[in-house]
Amino acid sequence: MECTYACRSSDHAIARRKFLAGMVGTAAGTMANGLGIFSRPAAAGMLAKDQKRVVVFYMHGGLSQLESWDPKPGTETGGPFRSIETSVPGIRISELLPEVARQMHHLCLVRGVNTSEDDHGKGQYLMQTGRRQSPAADYPALGAVCARTMSPEGSAIPGHIVLLPWGGGGRGSDAAYLGPRYSSVHLAEGKPPQYTDRPGQVSEAMDAARQDFRRQVNERFLRRRRTAVTEAYTYSYEQALGLMRKKDVFDVSKEPPRDFDRYGKTSFGRHCLMTRRLLEQGATFVQVWHANYDTHNENFNFHIEQLGEFDRAFAAFVADLHDRGMLDSTLIVVNSEFGRTPGINHLYGRDHWSHAWSVVLAGGKIQRGAAYGKTNARGTEVVDGQVSSAALFHTYLQAVGVDSTDSFDIEGREMPIADPAARAIQAVLA
Amino acid sequence: MGIPTGFDPGKAHIAAQWNVGTSMVCCRVEPKGRFVYCGVQGPTIHRIALADGKNVPLTGGHDSWVFALATTPNSGTLFSGGGDGRLVAWEVGGEAPRLLRKTEAHQGWIRALAASPDGRLVASGGNDRSVRIWETATGRRLHDLTGHEGQVYSLAFEPDGKTLLSGDLLGSLRRWDVATGREAGTFDAKALHHHDASQLVEFGGVRGLATSVDGSLIAAGGLHKASNPLGAVSEPLVLVFDSRNRKLVRTLTADGITSGVVWNLGFLADGSIVAASSGTSGGFLLFWKPGTDKSHHRLALPNPVRDLHIHPDGLRIATAHHDGYLRSIRLASGNG
């Protein structure tokens, strides 16, 4: 099952094409890509002693900032919901998020986001890479950058995991020049990666023998022709085998039953619980999608529905990471491709709006219990603390100790990790 | 009520309109027919005089939009329900409306209100999935009617006042015994609900409820064919049930409207059904004659419509619009 947006824009088809075939298919993709990888292991080594993690909650379709982080109750644009107090005096959020409000002291609201991109596909690309989509260049998504710079060498758990509400299986083509080794592994519906069960007709001994044979042939070949492409090919197989051995990492049913109640018995609740489990088992980057916020029609009804799920699970997740001492080493991001219009249309809907919206950060070196940036009374413009997606991208990385002003060395060519024209938002970094 | 002189839905036209100033959400004509009360995208209720359009604001009752209104049969008390979960009673019998009482009635929005035919009770329903029955004179809560698994969207007392109907987002339509507060039967209105596995949303619901004058029929309005809920692609639908055996007897559709939802509906003096439909296809009043399943007439409205209420004279319909206008639709020639 694929998600459909409300507005049926053509960019969605492009986004869907990124959902490629399975693990072996990815190896084929490597051949076509042909870019260098493995060129800068130093960064990973730098963080190995104290592994950092990143979790992105991607509010697919465009979460309304007015129904969440930047409410404007009692105004023409404010909608029917009221704002409520949070655990931080002076910071109020929508009444649709009562559980999150109790965790506000862990969070930092960035209320001055202006990305000037109202298209789903381009907005998603912009928020995931920190760069505008262009035919001239492709850039790696945050997850790929995190996997490349932060994942422990030799980890059996993929460094870049995306939990989708539908579909699943396969990998994204979102690592650009970093190569498919860092592309996202897609999981859905609380299931482990595809094909992690050994076929019933293949015994363990048979499997070990055929893998040994593959390695022998491969090594002989690599003695004569060793390239980044062959390395990636080898890596794909070894990672798949590692995944098969670590399959339990993805088995969310092993979590305590009471936690399923706390997180809510929804697909999103299960994915949040799975994310907690993955992080505890050493995953570096997990992106959790929550759908669907593309509410051109009946925005308020659908936000009641969606945020009801989100509030419970997200609040439990933040509280658990704090209680388990993981928040200092884990960056949490809540973002979308854009926000939604302050104006309310005739369908009780809100349309796409990228000029004044909000992103939420927590953990790592992020300030706790803070709100940065401000929009005007009607929420139509940023009036203080305006930030771009590029600045956010720098901030994400610096919050987990990655020098975002550094570059990747891709076959001798320096590729800036983040947009060199932007800088991190120092005011939100502790 | 007999059929009024000149009654002819085929001649429906806008006879008058007044700009309330804010996008409207709901409207109710008081039983005496002098005033229309309007809920808007804001906390203020507007009382519009049909004679001259005079607008009297009712303020101080709510902290959110007003989603539901109901008046007692003597036109003496108005009840309003808001996104703040508050049930507010207003004394409206005199020249100047006066706030009587505020009750924190529901967790989350109140979506629907209905006053009993004898004026003794008012029912409220909302996002907390509960239906509550209150004594109008005192504000005392008499019953909590529990069982809905979706948000309660609509309410209607049946004409004898002994039973109450409630409809929810999931297409559950229930009948309640008012004296005991116990469920007294259900109707299958699931055709009005759509779970979208692609967009991962619940959509539709029983948006409007009405009973025929003699109580023999119950009409439930909403939508079907929801191929894109977030993009408002759905078609208007009305289900008509036999009140006695609770069986579906008619399914009313409107050809050619590919984006519409029935926000409310009612039975006209000749037994035909009128519904307010709105969507990207436009705003319409749709008319179905008794015994027919395809709308026989429709009035295209100049702006999306969000609610309707039939005037007690049977010749006029008040409609609430997104552009902030209250419109008076006359079902006869001339402007009355």
Image (tube, grey):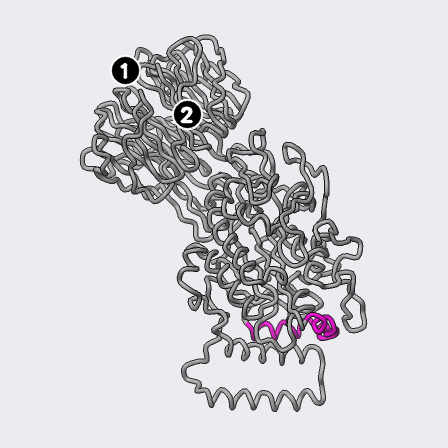
Marks 2 and 1: CB-CB under 8 Å?
no
Residue corresponding to mark 2: B102
Q: Is residue A270 above or below residue A103?
A: below
Asked if residue A126 lies left or right of residue B49, the reply is right
Please provide percent x and percent y for residue A95.
51, 40
Please provide percent x and percent y for residue B12.
40, 19
State the SS at label 2.
strand
Magenta stretch? A23-47
Can residue B285 be spotted in the picture? no
Q: Which mark is residue B28?
A: none
- Label count reads 2
Name which quarter of the figure residue B244 lies in: top left
Name which quarter of the figure residue A344 lies in: top right
Can residue A171 be spotted in the picture? yes
Please provide percent x and percent y for residue B126.
38, 36
Disc 2: host chain: B
Q: Amino acid at mark 2?
A: Lys
Q: For the C terminus of chain A, give its image quadrant.
A: bottom right
Asked if residue A25 lies left or right of residue A265, the reply is right
Disc 1: host chain: B
Q: Amino acid at mark 1?
A: Ile
Q: Is residue B246 above or below residue A179?
A: above
State the SS at label 1.
loop
Dominant secondary structure (helix, strand or loop) of the stretch shown in magenta: helix
Q: Which mark is residue B3?
A: 1
Q: Is residue A116 above or below residue B244?
A: below
The residue closer to the viewer here, A335 or A260, is A260
Q: Is residue A38 magenta?
A: yes
Q: Is residue B168 magenta?
A: no
Q: Residue at x 37, y 14 (%)?
A: B332
Q: Earlier in the sequence, mark 2 or mark 1?
A: 1
